[in-house]
């Protein structure tokens, strides 16, 4: 992707709670995206995340949060197919190509998740720029916070080789 053109801000999904309420983590990711978006000219927001334990999709909930933050509906692209980080990266790539978005690509996610997202986006052919992640921890509970951090180790060890194989065979 080139550095000219309309910028995109990719927001990686997080849990939706019962009744379609966004989790704190999801709300913070959207807020981080909006903070960066206010500094950019005409950004497109790409909300990526399918249906998890509860309906609606993570992407649909993010759209609702973005619209509450005064992001115009037509500036929001949804990927409701992604079930994990790697499938989000693949779906985002397709969406940006379909909509001919060629500008810089920003990544909005949590601090613990950011390294994996950045690596996978780079493997997908982007030169991603990290949005400053939310400063709040992913959970108030100590063990839950460490769960989120430690789960990135096997996730990174799985996703990177898969992305490399997909890239090798032209399927990333």
Image: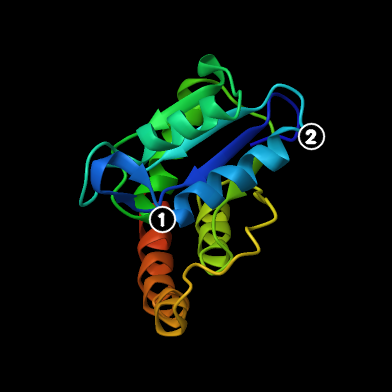
Residue under pointer 1: 168
- In the image, taking residue 136 as reference, residue 145 lies left or right, namely left
- Label 2: how many Cα within 10 Å (few below 14, some 14–19, many 20+): few
The N terminus lies in quadrant: top right
In the rendered image, the vertical position of residue 167 relative to residue 79, given as above or below: below
Q: Secondary structure at mark 2?
A: loop
Q: Residue furthest top?
A: 74
Rounded to the nearest whole Å, what is the CA distance between mark 2 and mark 1? 36 Å
Percent x, y of residue 144? 40, 78
The structure's colour scheme is: rainbow
From the viewer's side, name the closer residue of 66 and 40: 66
Looking at the image, which residue is at 35% across and 42% down? Answer: 58
Percent x, y of residue 10? 54, 41
From the viewer's side, name the closer residue of 23 and 104: 23
Percent x, y of residue 124? 50, 49
Q: Which mark, residue 35?
A: none
- In the image, taking residue 77 as reference, residue 30 lies left or right, namely right
- Label 1: how many Cα within 10 Å (few below 14, some 14–19, many 20+): few
Q: Would you say residue 152 is visible in this rendering?
A: yes
Within the image, what quadrant is residue 161 found in? bottom left
- In the image, taking residue 8 as reference, residue 156 lies left or right, namely left
Within the image, what quadrant is residue 2 found in? top right
Earlier residue among tags 2 and 1? 2
Looking at the image, which residue is at 59% across and 30% down? Answer: 69
Q: Secondary structure at mark 1?
A: helix
Give the number of callouts: 2
Looking at the image, which residue is at 62% across and 42% down? Answer: 33
Residue under pointer 2: 39
In the rendered image, the vertical position of residue 34 relative to residue 143, given as above or below: above
Q: Would you say residue 51 is visible in this rendering?
A: no
């Amino acid at each position: 992707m080139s550095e000219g053109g309309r910028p995109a801000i990719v927001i990686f999904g997080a849990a939706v709670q019962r009744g379609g309420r966004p989790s704190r983590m999801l709300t913070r990711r959207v807020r981080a995206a909006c903070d960066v978006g206010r500094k950019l000219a005409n950004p497109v927001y790409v909300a990526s995340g399918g249906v998890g334990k509860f309906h609606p999709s993570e992407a649909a909930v993010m759209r609702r949060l973005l619209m509450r933050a005064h992001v115009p509906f037509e500036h929001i692209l949804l990927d409701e197919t992604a079930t994990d980080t790697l499938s989000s990266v693949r779906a985002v790539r397709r969406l940006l190509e379909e909509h001919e978005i060629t500008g810089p690509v920003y990544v909005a996610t949590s601090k613990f998740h950011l390294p994996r997202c950045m690596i996978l986006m780079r493997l997908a052919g982007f030169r991603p720029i990290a949005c400053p992640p939310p400063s709040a921890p992913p959970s108030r509970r100590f063990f839950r916070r460490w769960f989120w951090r430690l789960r990135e180790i096997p996730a990174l060890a799985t996703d990177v080789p898969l992305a490399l194989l997909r890239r090798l065979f032209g399927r990333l």
